[in-house]
Image: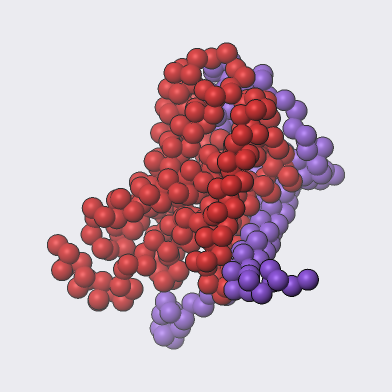
Amino acid sequence: MHIPDGFIDGTTSAGAAVVAAGGLGATLRRAGEVLDERRVPLAGLVAAFVFAVQMLNFPVASGTSGHLLGGALAAVLVGPAVGAVCVSVVLAVQALLFADGGLSALGLNTLNMALVTAFGGYAVFVLVRRVTSRTSSSVVLAAGIAAAISVVLSALAFTLEYALGGTGTASVPAVAGAMVGVHVLIGIGEGVITALVVGTVLATRPDLVWGARGLTIDQPAASVAEGAAS
Amino acid sequence: MKGLSRRRRFGLAAFVAAGLIVALVLAFFVSPSASGDPDGLDKVAIDRGFADTETDPALGDAPTAGYEVRGVDDDRMSTGLAGVIGVAVTFAVAGGVMLIVTRTRRTGPARGVRH
């Protein structure tokens, strides 16, 4: 999903950089307000983990692979603001050290893969939580669904940018259809990985999961809450 | 020794350390086996005929460009080491950025008037 240099014209890329910088500035301020200083290493871990898992391309269809974007995962673990900052750092490291994602496309990529996935994914997460029970399995389910949809949102964001400044000759509807089609498949992988990771953290240190803050952590109490909800 | 396995005994530092070990293992041992096929966007670019609009990356000469550490001939080792470098740098940068923004919040106004 990393956009290289050249796919999107300079004007659109520069515009995206300005929007991404503005969004990231506000997000950094928000992240500073919500993160307890003692949990700074946890934010570092989330970013490092997303970097590692982004390297693990899995096959999705003939001759096509996908990898975790991680914005929704990070948002559920440490909140959308801190999560978006984490993935933005991942993207910057990838572009600067590994030439993965164009330098001129860093704004585009930050928008699509950090801001859209973290905030869009978290919005879906909150919606799903609202219609499901207050249990840890609902948190896992909501995280998985949010992650899957976040990948499609990210693909749509690229399509919009292609419509505004794509240098290719393919029509926008053709690109839109192809992008959504393949990213639905990648989204399934994203959802499974996200659900597994959130489930693992919930089983180890449920108090560290931002998206599970409404849950009573004690198992017996959680069962009572579950009983009351149904 | 059942008490030791109670979840609340798993401290934050131990959790972060364990998580970092998992990330390093994935980056070093698993990432060299990852699929090398084009990802979703690249595949669409190929199929829809705009892959050739890609230009050479400005930082393509970086010593770790393309997740290969220059000078390391073994492919698996080269990719694995690039992964380890990436995990370490990402942890440090993300932690550093978050430390700065959490501290700026606390001491922000005071810092603002300092000369």
Residue A8: x percent and y percent?
Answer: 62, 26
Q: Name the quarter where the N terminus of chain A is drawn.
A: top right
Chain in red (letter): A
- Which quadrant of the view contains residue A206? bottom left
Please give the name of the residue rendered at 42% of the width and 47% of the height, measured from the top-left corner: A121
In this view of the protein, which residue sits in the foreground, B75 or A164? A164
Kindly tell me whether residue A59 is visible in this rendering: no
Residue A114: x percent and y percent?
Answer: 54, 46
In this view of the protein, which residue sits in the foreground, A76 or A61? A76
Residue A224 located left or right of residue B25: left
Please give the name of the residue rendered at 54% of the width and 29% of the height, measured from the top-left corner: A161
Kindly tell me whether residue A210 is visible in this rendering: yes
In this view of the protein, which residue sits in the foreground, B36 or A184? A184
Please give the name of the residue rendered at 59% of the width and 73% of the height, measured from the top-left corner: B106
Residue B29 located left or right of residue A144: right
The image shows residue A199, relative to residue A67, as above or below, that is below
Please give the name of the residue rendered at 14% of the width and 62% of the height, measured from the top-left corner: A230
- What tint does the image give chain B? purple
